[in-house]
Image: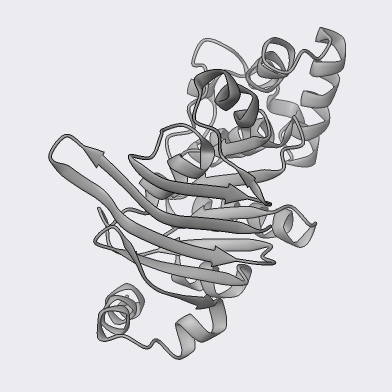
Amino acid sequence: MKLALENLSKSYGQHQALDGLDLHLENARCLTLIGPSGGGKSTTLRLVAGLEKASGGHILLNDKAVPCSEEELRDYRKSIGVVFQSYNLFPHFDALTNIALPLEKVHGVAKADAQERAYELLARFKLADHSRKKPSELSGGQNQRVAIARSLAHDPELILFDEPTSALDPEMSAQILDVIEELIQSGKDCIVVTHQMGFAKRASDYAAFISHGKVAESGTSKDLFDSPQSQELRQFLERELKY
C-alpha cells in the first residue's frame, strides 16, 4: 500500500476534526492509527474510505487520488472494504444474505455466485453452521466475523477497520484481532484504528499517532512503540499499557 495524506482538514460545523494532517507511506502492509479519543483517527479513516469528503487537502492511495464527485466516489468505494465497530449488518437478513446481497446489488455478481462466495467466506471464518442466523441470534464476535467476511467478499484493494473490537469482551476481541492478523499475513492491505496497543505493535508494520487533528508522530511500529520521540506519545502509551 502506498498512501499520501496531504494537509488534510475536516470540519463539522465549528469543530475542527482534522487540522493539516500529513502522512506518507511508500510500502506498507498494515497501518495502525492510534491516539486519544476524539483526536481524529476515525475521521481520517472515513476520508480514506470515501465515506466523507475532506474540507481541504488531498488523499492518494497507490498513486490515485481519492475522487471528489459523488459518482466517482461510488466507484471508488467498491475498491474498499470497511469494518465498523458496530458491525452495520442488516438486522432482518441472515448472515449469508448480509454478505451475498451487497455482492449482488452493488457489485453486479449473479445471485448464485454471490451466495456461493458468501458461504465460502462463512466457512473460512468458522460460521458455516450459522449462515441462516440473523444478527440478533449471533454473538458480538460472530457478528463482527460476518462483517469482516462481507468486507472481503468483493476482494477489495484495501480493508479499513474502525475500532473493530471496541464493542466486544476481551475473549471475543482476541478472536477478532487474530482474524485481522491472519488477513494481514495472507497479504491483504489494511488500515486499523485501534486502542489495542499490543496488536498494533505486533501486527502492523507502520503506525501513526494522531492527536488534535494532526499526525503527531509516525514511523515503523517497532520504532513508534519502543522509542517514542514526544512526551505526548510516551504519556499516551504509558496510560494505554498500564492495565
Instruction: Tell me which residue sits at (54%, 29%) in the image.
Output: 138
For the residue pair 143 and 205, the one nearer the viewer reads as: 205
Q: Quadrant of the N terminus?
A: bottom right
The x, y position of residue 164, in whole percent, is: 48, 47
Instruction: Tell me which residue sits at (69%, 54%) in the image.
Output: 189
Residue 109 at least partly seen: yes
Res. 27 image quadrant: bottom right
> Vertically, is 136 above or below 43?
above
Res. 167 image quadrant: top left
The x, y position of residue 29, in whole percent, is: 69, 62
Instruction: Tell me which residue sits at (68%, 13%) in the image.
Output: 101
Res. 43 image quadrant: top left
> Vertically, is 186 above or below 54?
below
> Vertically, is 174 above or below 92?
below
The x, y position of residue 80, in whole percent, is: 63, 37
- Colouring convention used in this rendered image of the protein: one colour
> Vertically, is 90 above or below 146?
above
Instruction: Tell me which residue sits at (76%, 30%) in the image.
Output: 128
Q: Quadrant of the C terminus?
A: bottom left
Residue 164 at least partly seen: no
The x, y position of residue 230, in whole percent, is: 31, 85
